[in-house]
Structure formats: C-alpha cells, structure tokens
Image: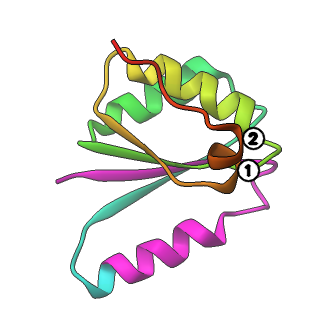
Amino acid sequence: MKTCLAVLNSKFMHTSLALRDIRAYARKKNIPLELAEYTINAESDNIVASLAEKQADLYGFSCYVFNIDKTMAVIRSLQDAMSTISFDSPVCILTRWRPSTR
C-alpha cells in the first residue's frame, strides 16, 4: 500500500516534526511512506495536482489550527478523484469535521 502523509506548513523553514516521527517509526517496521510538505501560501490546485501525481492508496493530513481551512479545501478537491483520506488531529476531533460522503 502506497501511503502519503501531507502537511501545509506556515513556511518552508517550519517543517513538520510529527510527520518525520511517524516516518521514522514506519521505517523501523519496513512500512514505506512518502512525505509531502507544502506551505499555506501555495495554490490549492498546485498542491492537489502534486498529491494526485503521487498516486497513493492512502493520504493522511497533518491538521493544525493555522492550516485547517486550507487543508480541508485541498482534501475536498483531492477527494473527488483520489483514494482514502484519513484524519487524526485534535482540530478535526474538536470540529467534528468529516469528509463528504458521495
């Protein structure tokens, strides 16, 4: 299974330690996964196109208060044509946000 973990950082100089920690754990278990990092200033269409090129079976997103709106917009666009998307974030739990069912 091809897995891609994505995050929209506030700046390129701010990388996601959480995703790197998950990747380190996955490597110990011989689970391949790819990281995709963007900034909240990037165009949503470009982010979606980049993620779609990865053709992952599973996309996971790291959600924070500062990136939740843009992340959800990217997810909605990606959801139209892509694979399973997972949510695990205090922000998602607090807002009870769920992707639309079609």
Check contact, mark 1 vs mark 2: CB within 8 A. Answer: yes
Badge 1 amino acid: Tyr
Q: Quadrant of the N terminus?
A: bottom left
Per the rendering, the mark at residue 64 is 1
Q: x and y percent of residue 19 in the render?
A: 54, 66
Mark 1: few/some/many CA within 10 Å (<14, 14-19, 20+): some
Measured as percent of width and height from the top left, residue 45 is found at 57, 18
Compared with 29, 81 (above or below) is above
Does 22 appear in magenta? yes
Kind of residue indicated by mark 2: Asn
10 Å neighbourhood of mark 2: few (<14), some, or many (≥20)? some
CA separation in Å, label 1 and label 2: 5 Å
Q: Is residue 75 left or right of residue 43?
A: left
| Res. 50 visible in picture | yes
Nearest the viewer among 22 and 45 is: 22
Q: Which residue is mark 2?
A: 67
Q: Is residue 12 left or right of 93 when viewed as pictured?
A: right
